[in-house]
């Protein structure tokens, strides 16, 4: 049977029994792929995203998987302005689905040949897919705040707390929460979701630093997961005592004013619920604007600042890598931007070792 006749019999166009049978076969393929991914312990949300993407491509191609062509994949990518990393993710997803249905161990090729006279084939290969050429493909605008910028942000937040406390209108609780939240994100190198999901019980004593009390370690339970895996956990040692003092004041004197003592979350909304990552973004934009900082700075830049400032201060890079939960040192390196003063200090130290030894 020719490709044209097979596509006409089970194409996306047209109606009737043939159309329903084609849709049923496609659904069964996706269901089998789901089971295969679940057996690999991939997260259901990841599998859902992949299935939606495969269906999106089928809609774009106006064809079933047994008729897909390279030109359809290439036209799909060319018609959109996705980021390089997004293109790779989409192409890997389509390639992964076709890798499954083309594998003789699953029998889909034989079934397609019997039902439609066509056999699915892999259309994603080295000639038409984006390559992974860099360890980090994030936005170049994500940079650390300088120490001056960071101090400016914290000063404006603290000034906002004082102004709100003296004003007749409400806002003192929110301002105090924001000021402490941004200090915490910076001082423990947190991502926004990690910060939003913090519970009061996630902080504990560090036997090596008992002087910090119950804020010696931050147990991050919702770290960024590897593809298809559950959230990664890590324990972040407290290295900035001033931040522990600020957080301790918030937990001990301020958080209770929300009137929801039974709620586990550290950061609460005005209605007594857990703050969301999007809300953290919105609050950061507000305070960033009040501090007159560049618009390209995001709350994630506080995490970059944590890494860069520790490296500048001479902290062991491996320790920093473990603190922020990176699997590879190369990832931590992409977060690091050493300032001019630190570079000069390192240069002077290096030259001193050379000349002092002569």
Image (spheres, grey):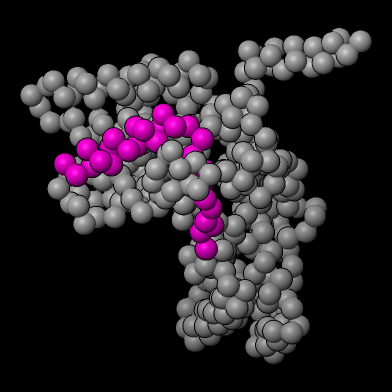
Dominant secondary-structure state across the stretch colored magenta: helix
State which region is magenta. Answer: 230-257
| Residue at (56% x, 63% y) in the render | 229
Residue 237 percent across, percent down from the top left: 52, 43
| Residue at (61% x, 46% y) in the render | 322
| Residue at (14% x, 48% y) in the render | 259
User: Horizontally, is 132 left or right of 273 in the view?
Assistant: right
Q: Which is nearer the eye, 291 or 201?
A: 201
The relative height of residue 330 versus residue 61 in the rendered view (above or below) is: above
| Residue at (35% x, 18% y) in the render | 155
The relative height of residue 27 versus residue 115 in the rendered view (above or below) is: above
Q: Which is nearer the eye, 215 or 100?
A: 215
Find out whether residue 27 is within the magenta segment. Answer: no
Q: Quadrant of the C terminus?
A: top right
User: Horizontally, is 148 left or right of 92 in the view?
Assistant: left
User: Horizontally, is 178 left or right of 61 in the view?
Assistant: left
């Amino acid at each position: 049977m020719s490709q044209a006749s097979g596509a006409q019999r089970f194409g996306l166009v047209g109606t009737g029994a043939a159309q329903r049978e084609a849709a049923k076969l496609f659904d069964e393929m996706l269901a089998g792929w789901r089971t295969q991914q679940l057996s690999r312990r991939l997260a259901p949300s990841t599998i859902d995203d992949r299935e939606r993407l495969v269906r999106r491509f089928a809609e774009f191609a106006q064809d079933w998987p047994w008729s897909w062509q390279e030109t359809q994949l290439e036209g799909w990518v060319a018609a959109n302005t996705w980021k390089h990393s997004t293109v790779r993710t989409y192409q890997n997803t389509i390639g992964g689905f076709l890798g499954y249905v083309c594998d003789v161990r699953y029998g889909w090729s034989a079934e397609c040949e019997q039902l439609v006279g066509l056999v699915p084939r892999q259309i994603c290969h080295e000639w038409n897919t984006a390559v992974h050429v860099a360890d980090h493909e994030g936005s170049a605008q994500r940079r650390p705040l300088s120490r001056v910028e960071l101090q400016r942000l914290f000063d404006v937040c603290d000034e906002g707390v004082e102004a709100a406390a003296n004003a007749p209108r409400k806002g003192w609780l929110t301002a105090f929460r924001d000021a402490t939240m941004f200090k915490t994100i910076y001082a423990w190198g947190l991502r926004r979701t990690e910060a939003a999901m913090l519970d009061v019980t996630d902080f504990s004593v560090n036997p090596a630093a008992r002087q910090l009390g119950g804020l010696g370690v931050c147990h991050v339970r919702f770290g960024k997961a590897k593809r298809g895996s559950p959230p990664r956990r890590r324990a972040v040692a407290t290295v900035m005592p001033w931040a522990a003092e600020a957080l301790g004041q918030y937990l001990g004197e301020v958080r209770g004013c929300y009137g929801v003592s039974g709620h586990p979350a550290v950061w609460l909304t005005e209605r007594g619920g857990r703050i969301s990552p999007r809300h953290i973004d919105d609050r950061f934009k507000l305070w960033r604007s009040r501090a007159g900082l560049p618009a390209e700075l995001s709350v994630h830049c506080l995490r970059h600042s944590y890494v860069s400032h520790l490296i500048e201060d001479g902290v062991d890079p491996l320790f920093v890598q473990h603190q922020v939960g990176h699997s590879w040192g190369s990832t931590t390196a992409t977060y690091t931007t050493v300032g001019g003063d630190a570079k000069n200090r390192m240069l002077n130290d290096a030259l001193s070792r050379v000349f002092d030894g002569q």
